[in-house]
């Protein structure tokens, strides 16, 4: 193997670090679609040779998976904090509320994970019959859905925090 793929791998890594890990500008963070589209464009544009595009998309999806896992952990920590609040009418507080919310959130996350897997896999397996573009399109699907789910989980916390101020 020549040194050439490593040079392009560095370019892809920089693109991913800037777009996926550091996050998009505030305006782009308002929906999961904007950072996902930017990541997809960076991985499929002319800056990378064809042989690196699939790996770039896979790396982006992996980084988003890690961000989603962290967002889920933050959400569960916020839910656990509800148990320490004194229950009062009209508020989300106390052990019972925290336990009910935790169960509901975990059920919703499990349902989302199942949808995510089935939907993106079906693009590869059925919609594009494993053709030459199937892997790219399935990876793009994963990036879009992961970015949107991260946004959904994060937005709820931002709305609650804003409501308390």
Image (cartoon, rainbow, N blue to C red):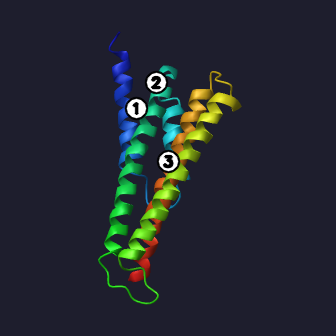
Q: Which residue is mark 2?
A: 52
The numbered dot on residue 146 is 3
Residue drawn 32% across the image and 81% down it: 85
Q: Is residue 43 visible?
A: yes
Residue drawn 36% across the image and 46% down it: 21
Rounded to the nearest whole Å, what is the CA distance between mark 2 and mark 3?
21 Å
Residue drawn 36% across the image and 16% down it: 4
Q: Which of these two is toward me, 131 or 16?
A: 131
Neighbours of disc 3 within 10 Å: few (<14), some (14-19), many (20+): many
Q: Look at discs 1 and 3 and give the one toward the viewer.
A: 3
Q: Which of these two is toward me, 89 or 96?
A: 96
Sooner in the amino-acid sequence: mark 2 or mark 3: 2
Contact between labelled residues 2 and 1, with CB atoms less than 8 Å apart: yes
Residue 109 % position (x, y) = 49, 54
Can you say whether 95 is above or below 144 in the image? below
The numbered dot on residue 12 is 1
Sooner in the amino-acid sequence: mark 1 or mark 2: 1
């Amino acid at each position: 193997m020549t040194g050439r793929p490593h040079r392009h791998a560095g370019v892809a890594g920089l693109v991913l670090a800037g777009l996926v890990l550091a996050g998009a500008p505030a305006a782009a963070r308002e929906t999961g679609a904007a950072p996902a589209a930017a990541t997809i464009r960076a991985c499929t544009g002319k800056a990378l040779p064809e042989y690196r595009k699939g790996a770039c998309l896979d790396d982006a999806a992996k980084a988003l998976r890690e961000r989603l896992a962290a967002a889920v952990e933050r959400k569960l920590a916020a839910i656990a904090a509800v148990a320490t609040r004194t229950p009062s009418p009209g508020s989300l507080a106390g052990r019972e509320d925290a336990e009910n919310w935790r169960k509901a959130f975990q059920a919703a996350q499990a349902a989302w994970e199942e949808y995510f897997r089935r939907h993106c896999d079906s693009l590869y397996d059925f919609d594009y019959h494993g053709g030459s573009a199937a892997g790219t399109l399935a990876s793009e699907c994963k990036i879009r859905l992961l970015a949107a789910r991260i946004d959904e989980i994060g937005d709820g916390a931002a709305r609650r925090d804003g409501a308390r101020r």
